[in-house]
Every structure is written in C-alpha cells, then in structure tokens.
C-alpha cells in the first residue's frame, strides 16, 4: 500500500512539474511575443504609412513636424494617433522617390559605394590580422590585441576629432577615402574573428603542417572554411553598422551630393514626411535582405563555441 502511494505521489509531482514548466514556457513566449511586436511596430508603421498620400500623412503627423515663425518647435497640444492602415493606398511617394526625384536614388547609390568597399576590405584585413593574432603568441601581440579591444569599446564620437585631423593630414577630407580608410581598419571584425579563430583545435593545424601545408595554405584551406559562420556574422554586423552611419558623412564629406541616404533621413522637414516614409522603406530593404539571407550564419557565428562540428 505504501509503495503504491509513493509511486502515485511521485507521478503527481512529475505532472505538477510538467504543468509548471509548460506555464513558464507559455509566459516566456507571451513576453517574447510582446517585445517582438513592440520592436516591429516602427517598421510596420513606416511601411504602411509609405502607402499613404501626402495629404493624409500631413493631416496625421503634420503637428509633429510643425515649426513656429522663428523656426522653433511648436508645442503639441493634441494627442497624435498612430495610423497603421491608410484610407486609400497610394504609390505617389514611391513614384516620386524612384522616378521623379533621382537625387534619392543617387543618395542610395552613395550608400552602396560607401558601405560596400568597407565591408569587403574590412573582412579581408580582419581575416589576415586574426590569423596573425591566432598563430603567433607573445607580449607584443597581446598589447596590440588589447589596443584593438580598447579602440572597439570607444564610440565613434570619441575618435571623430583624431579621424578628422588624420584625414586632413592625408588630404582625404571631402572624398570617399575619409570614410573608407577608418572603416576598413576598424577593429570590430578583427576582434570577432580572432576570438572565433582561437577556438580552432591546435591538432587540426598541426595535422595540416604534418601534411606539408604552409601558412598560406593553412589560412586559406583550414582557417577560412572553419570561420565561415564568423565571417558572415561579421559581414552582416559591419554592413548594418556602416549602412546606417550619419556622423562620418556629415563631418568628413562637405559636399551634400556625396552624402548617403541615411543623412537625408536625419534631416526630415515638414514638407517631406511622406517621402521620408517611402525612402525609409526603400532604405530598409538591403538590411532586411542581408539579415534574412544570413540569419543562420549570424546565429551560428555568434553562438557556436567550437572549431569543428561533430
């Protein structure tokens, strides 16, 4: 009798634990879904409002961007209601952006020209530097790598003045090189790839050396294939970071014709609210495509803790 009661009691306790675990999972899912909705609301609002007519957008959000006679902001006495569904779908904003005003496409192309070389060459420099930090140990290497970490922790605003002075010394101000050079030699990708490359088992490299592989062959045929996830992760993060840059072009590029589209989005005025929604939607497309295409690599590169998958 006591044994049967003990077994029944154990089963009931196991059921209670399962119910409690299911409740915790359900609550965690609801909380995560709530945060996901909050994070997605600005994107959804931008996309849906881009299909509104200029008059409808002005009637909904005109008071937010209104200015007084002396150029100052006006106090908003009425509550602004966010509208997600347009009264009538209109493509006039996109027609203006894509066909009637080529300046927006020019600024979009400027963003591509500024971001593309930075992503490609920063990964190239980071791959070589990371291999050097991984293969060769010593006090000097540790000091240099520590310096990389310190530079990575500093926000761009801290190094903006030195970058401007160096760009002036190199006579690259108001040229793309003033943006490219600091971006190509940014320490972030070096740090990420070095930490990842150090997880490659030493036995793998030693086996390649026994087979007669040189340093270049080890780098090209052993380290790079094993670091594919980290390289893709670094590429996605670097692309998103420089795709959204604002301070660098504003300070280093005096000619507005060379500014990227991100600078235009930071200078919205009352007469371009509707265009800003459409431009922002177009501007989000490359970032979304890059993220969706490389999501698996991004997660793998950040969370994977070993050099070789079993």
Image (cartoon, rainbow, N blue to C red):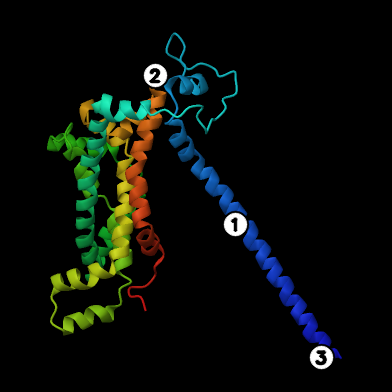
Question: Which residue has dot 3 on it?
Answer: 3
Furthest toward the right, the residue is 1
Question: Which residue has dot 1 on it?
Answer: 29
CA neighbours of label 2 inside 10 A, class few (<14), some (14 to 19), many (20+): few
Q: Is residue 162 visible?
A: yes
User: Of marks 1 and 2, which one's residue comes earlier in the chain?
Assistant: 1
Give the Cα distance between marks 3 and 2: 81 Å
Estimate the x, y position of residue 10 in percent, counting from the top left: 76, 81
Instruction: Determine the residue positioned at 45% across, 40% down.
Output: 43
Report if the CB atoms under discs 3 and 2 are less than 8 Å apart: no
Instruction: Determine the residue positioned at 27% across, 82% down.
Output: 203
User: Of marks 3 and 1, which one's residue comes earlier in the chain?
Assistant: 3
Estimate the x, y position of residue 163 in percent, counting from the top left: 24, 39
Report if the CB atoms under discs 1 and 2 are less than 8 Å apart: no
User: Of marks 3 and 2, which one's residue comes earlier in the chain?
Assistant: 3
Question: Which residue has dot 2 on it?
Answer: 271
Estimate the x, y position of residue 79 in percent, counting from the top left: 60, 23
State which quadrant residue 269 falls in.
top left
Estimate the x, y position of residue 227 in percent, counting from the top left: 28, 66
Between 246 and 36, which is closer to the camera in this rendering? Answer: 36
Secondary-structure class at tag 2: helix
Furthest toward the top, the residue is 69
Q: Tell me if residue 205 comes above or below residue 230 in the rendering.
A: below
């Amino acid at each position: 009798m006591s044994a049967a009661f003990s077994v029944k009691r154990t089963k009931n306790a196991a059921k209670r634990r399962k119910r409690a675990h299911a409740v915790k999972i359900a609550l965690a899912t609801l909380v995560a879904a709530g945060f996901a909705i909050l994070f997605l609301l600005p994107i959804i609002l931008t996309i849906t409002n881009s299909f509104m007519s200029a008059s409808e957008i002005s009637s909904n959000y005109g008071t937010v961007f209104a200015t007084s006679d002396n150029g100052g902001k006006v106090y908003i006495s009425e509550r602004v209601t966010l509208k997600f569904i347009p009264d009538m779908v209109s493509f006039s904003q996109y027609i203006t952006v894509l066909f009637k005003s080529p300046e927006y496409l020019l600024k979009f192309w400027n963003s591509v020209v500024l971001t593309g070389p930075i992503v490609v060459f920063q990964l190239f420099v980071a791959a070589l530097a990371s291999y050097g930090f991984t293969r060769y140990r010593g006090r000097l290497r540790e000091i240099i790598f520590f310096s990389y970490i310190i530079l990575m922790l500093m926000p761009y605003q801290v190094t903006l003045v030195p970058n401007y002075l160096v760009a002036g010394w190199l006579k690259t101000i108001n040229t793309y090189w003033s943006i490219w050079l600091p971006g190509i030699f940014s320490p972030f990708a070096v740090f990420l790839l070095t930490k990842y490359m150090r997880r490659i088992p030493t036995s793998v490299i030693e086996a390649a050396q026994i087979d007669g592989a040189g340093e270049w062959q080890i780098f090209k045929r052993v380290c790079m294939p094993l670091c594919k996830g980290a390289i893709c992760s670094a590429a996605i993060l670097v692309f998103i970071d420089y795709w959204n840059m604002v301070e660098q072009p504003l300070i280093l590029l005096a000619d507005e014709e060379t500014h990227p589209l991100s600078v235009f989005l930071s200078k919205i005025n009352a007469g371009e609210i509707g265009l800003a929604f459409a431009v922002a939607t177009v501007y989000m497309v490359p970032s979304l495509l890059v993220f969706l295409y490389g999501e698996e690599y991004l997660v793998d590169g950040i969370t994977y803790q070993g050099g070789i998958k079993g």
